[in-house]
Image: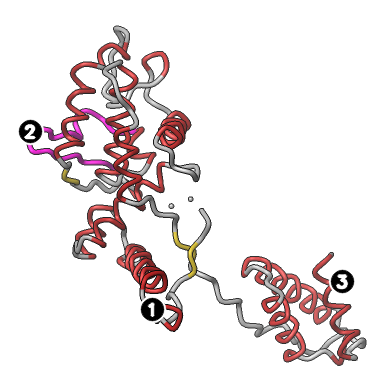
Amino acid sequence: SSDLRQLVAYCRKVGRMEIARIRALDLSRFLQGLSAAGRRPATQARVRVSLRQLFLYLQRQRRLAQSPAADLPAPRQVRRLPRVVHEGEAHRLMQSVAGDAPRQLRDRAALELLYGAGLRVSELCALRLEQLQLSRNLVQPTGKGNKDRLVPLGLPAAAALRAYLEHARPLLLKGQTSRTVFIGHGGRPISRMTVYNIVRRCGLAAAIKTPLSPHQLRHAYATHLVRGGADLRAVQQLLGHTSIATTEIYTHVVTDELYAAVQRHHPLGRQAPAPLCEAASSQE
């Protein structure tokens, strides 16, 4: 494979052409070279697996007494942060669906629940009428592990959902019956692909340059809550995260934005510390 060819080239360079002379330090330096060359952590991890398998095979064939790759450390995984929709973009997105046609009312309500309640796309598609408590402006989605949670709706989201249920949903059902809140083609429950298309189409209409996904709106919901001072435990409950560690990524998003603001606007910004995490260019 290409991984082993690279190893052979490295061994030739350092004078370790005999398999029995290769040491753990050689392999460690080989992997460090991949990192220095800009190879992704996932690629480094794959090469590490290839090395472990190769030397394990040689050990089983009694070509080696001990594998030098047995204790190779795993490459450090860079935490990749989601691309976050800014408040202004989110506002434009919510305003991108105008009109009172059935599909327009449905699309507006879907966007409001994705950004205004942080629902996963699977939760939105599976949402049922009995999970709505509109008298209290609450929605009760079922998340991962079949766990329910209560999420309060802001006034715009609640108003959009009421307008959809009253004026659009009966028309989209076309005489059929369903307990699913969001109705798609032919009176059937809305599909994930339809929701993706709604978000991307509305993102273009709102002049948002990068393609959007429903999950980015969930990220925006959480990030904007944290930026506004919301308690991290409360955000964890709103998102339905089992572990607080999953929610903590949004504190890093906000911290990186603060560093970026200093670097852009302060005269000594170039001397500011580096961000804690690397931002990713673009999907739980």
The residue at the far top in this view is 175
Q: CA distance from mark 1 to mark 2?
A: 52 Å
Q: Which residue is mark 3?
A: 5
Q: Which residue is mark 2?
A: 135
Residue beneath the point at 21% across and 36% down = 157
Residue 36 included in the magenta stretch of the image: no
Task: Work out whether mark 1 precedes mark 2 in sequence or the reverse, and give the earlier one.
Answer: 2
Q: Residue 284 at x, y = what percent?
A: 43, 52
* Identity, as a three-letter code, of the amino acid under mark 2: Ser
Q: Which residue is mark 1?
A: 267
Return the residue nearer the eye: 10 or 127.
10
* Identity, as a three-letter code, of the amino acid under mark 1: Pro
167 w.r.t. 69: above or below = above
Q: CA distance from mark 2 to mark 3?
A: 66 Å
Residue beneath the point at 23% across and 53% down = 238
Return the residue nearer the eye: 14 or 221.
221
Which stretch appears magenta? 126-142
For disc 3, the neighbor class at 10 Å (few under 14, some 14 to 19, many from 20) is few
Q: CA distance from mark 3 to mark 1?
A: 49 Å
| Helix, strand or loop status at disc 2 | helix
Q: Residue 181 at x, y = what percent?
A: 27, 26
* Identity, as a three-letter code, of the amino acid under mark 3: Arg
Residue beneath the point at 38% across and 19% down = 188
